[in-house]
Image: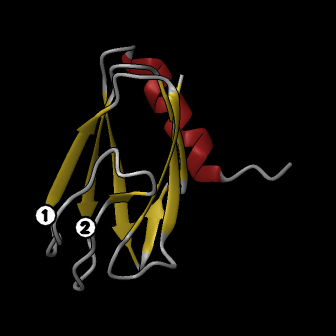
Amino acid sequence: MKIVAGVIVALLTVAHVGAASSVAVGIEEFKFTPPVLAVPVGTTVTWINHDEEPHTITSANGAFGSTGLSQEDTFAQTFIRPGRYEYFCALHPHMKAIVIVK
């Protein structure tokens, strides 16, 4: 089992702020950070594009999606159902990540 440092930080952040919380995912150097995020139901996840290139947040199953985000633009999604939500950047499909909602 591989543990990613960003996942541990994200889990600790969510644990401290409670069920109705907000968590940020950074987009930098063509990566989503953290690449795996676990949150409780009701959490709003906000993605922030720190790259100079535009990126999208595109759900693999069509559950949610953003338009192209320019540098420092944001996109927010509130997760109201448990599940595993895989997403990627439609402009750079190698960029992939997951939100796990419990």
Q: Nearer the viewer, residue 23 or 93?
A: 93
**Residue 9's disc number:** none
Kindly identify the amino acid type of the residue bearing the numbered disc 2.
Answer: Asn
17 relative to 9, above or below: above
Kindly identify the amino acid type of the residue bearing the numbered disc 1.
Answer: Asp
Residues tagged 1 and 2 counted as in contact (Cβ below 8 A): yes
In the rendered view, does 38 fall on the left or right side of 19?
right
Single out the residue that lies furthest toward the bottom.
Answer: 53
37 relative to 60, above or below: above
SS type, badge 1: loop
Determine the residue positioned at 53% across, 50% down.
98
Q: Quadrant of the C terminus?
A: top right
Label 1: how many residues lie within 10 Å, few (<14), some (14-19) or many (20+)?
A: some
Query: Which is more N-terminal, label 2 or label 1?
Result: 2
Label 2: how many residues lie within 10 Å, few (<14), some (14-19) or many (20+)?
A: many
54 relative to 101, above or below: below
Q: Residue 56 placed where, x, y %?
A: 27, 68
Determine the residue positioned at 27% across, 78% down.
51
Determine the residue positioned at 42% across, 79% down.
30
The residue wearing badge 2 is 49
The residue wearing badge 1 is 73
Q: CA distance from mark 1 to mark 2?
A: 6 Å
The type of colouring in the image is: secondary structure
Single out the residue that lies furthest toward the right.
Answer: 1
Q: Nearer the viewer, residue 72 or 95?
A: 95
Q: Residue 70 placed where, x, y %?
A: 14, 75
